Amino acid sequence: MLYYARGSRTDILTERDIWTALREVFDSMGPRRRVLAIPPDFTRLNSYAGPITGMVNDYFGSRLTDVMPALGTHSPMTDEQIASMYDGVQAGKFRVHDWRNDVVTVGTVPAEYVREVSEGRVSYTWPAQVNKLLLDPTFDLILSIGQVVPHEVIGMANYTKNIFVGVGGAEGINKSHFLGASYGMERIMGRARTPVRDVLEYARTHFISRLPIVYILTVRAKDEVTGELVTRGLFIGDDFECFEKASALSLETNFIIVGKEIRKCVVYLDPAEFKSTWLGNKAVYRTRMALADGAELLILAPALKEFGEDPEIDRLIRKYGYKGTPHTLEATAANEDLQNNLSASAHLIHGSSEGRFKITYCPGPGMTREEIEGVGFAWGDLDEALRRYPVDKMIDGWNTMPDGEEVYYISNPALGLWAYPERF
């Protein structure tokens, strides 16, 4: 059922607009005794999920008993991050999702179905896993909150991904990521229907349809006039229609077509948001379809301090490196540690240029040149790069530097998907 749908490429929904919409939807649902909210973690700071969770808290008060950020495999939020992102929501309501231990398998998607939707690329069963808290029968409303934006693993982020990956289990996360990587990023990104989405939708309709889950989805983009991040759309519902409408708007607002291939791309990773290549490689995923053969992707990463958000994933990235699909698939077939962490294998594929363009990381003091080069990236000096490419003076899009060099600048790779038509 679709409860609410509003948005367009030019709309700007204010805080009052969103609060009014939420009140109307919640009023129409009737009284609820106990509510669970599943918003994103701090890595999705720009989703507007923080203020929305605050509005949910204001509406339901003590009936909102639990808030579980959808960590996936990310590090748990700190107290400071919770206070910053979810201002006004009582700290005692927050629960930490343990993706290795606190999950229940609610059903299994057959291998035959996985083989069919992946066009034969993988043929394993897929476990539909969720945090055990979702199965508590005293919850009569579960609110899954988040942003729909192009995504490298599943096509478009959020909706059921927030459930089966955000608060899912190790095996389900690993296999879903490997499925997407095996099928191919360029065939997935920016699309609402993909093999990974089909598998999750099968799981939703067969295994969790009884759960009282309602999805609150935003579409966000930078305003072309002010440069401010604004909410272009809000969609609330409990089935695929809600996500489909949000995806259509996200494709309009977050998909940037470049008129010519990019030969030099400079991407800035906000220190508040990006501290790992696990997240920072959005600079690679989201730009690869716009980059020319032989291009250079220069990533300015002042807060970079690790490769993986999880210690084991970090170890695997350091061990195997971003060395392309053939190398990663061979390593996965030969090594049990990768077989047990297929999301790491998928990430290594996603983060490689496949030798087509050069990836140069410019880290701050948290990571050494040896570490950067050890995983297969080129290293660049951050201070020197910032002097040459002053991010406070550049604009998103094409820039001509004082010496005549033409570069394409992206201030936040999480907000879009860039492509040259012939590569999409």
Image (cartoon, rainbow, N blue to C red):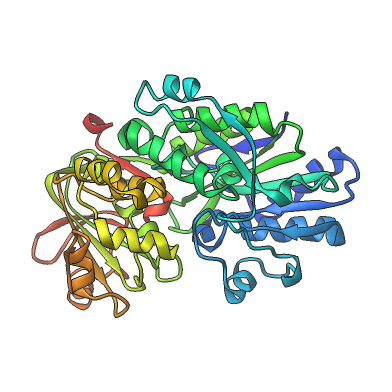
Q: Write the residue at 68% across / 55% down.
A: 52
Question: Which residue in the rendered view is the most extreme toward the bottom?
Answer: 365
Q: If the image is split into quadrants, where does the C terminus sit?
A: top left
Residue 27, percent from left and from top: 86, 43
Q: Indicate the quadrant where residue 387 lies.
A: bottom left
Please determine whether, in this image, residue 184 is positioned above or below residue 290. Answer: above
Residue 2, percent from left and from top: 70, 30
- Front-most of 334 and 277? 334
Please determine whether, in this image, residue 1 is positioned above or below residue 101. Answer: above
Q: If the image is split into quadrants, where does the N terminus sit?
A: top right
- Front-most of 364 and 419? 364
Horizontal side of 107 relative to 298 (left or right) equals: right
Residue 221, percent from left and from top: 47, 49
Horizontal side of 157 relative to 163 (left or right) equals: left
- Front-most of 279 and 319? 319
Q: Write the residue at 18% across / 72% down.
A: 370
Residue 309, percent from left and from top: 43, 63
Report the label total. Answer: 0
Horizontal side of 16 relative to 244 (left or right) equals: right
Q: Write the residue at 45% across / 70% down.
A: 272
**Is residue 194 among what the camera can see?**
no
**Is residue 304 among what the camera can see?**
yes
Q: Write the residue at 53% across / 61% down.
A: 45
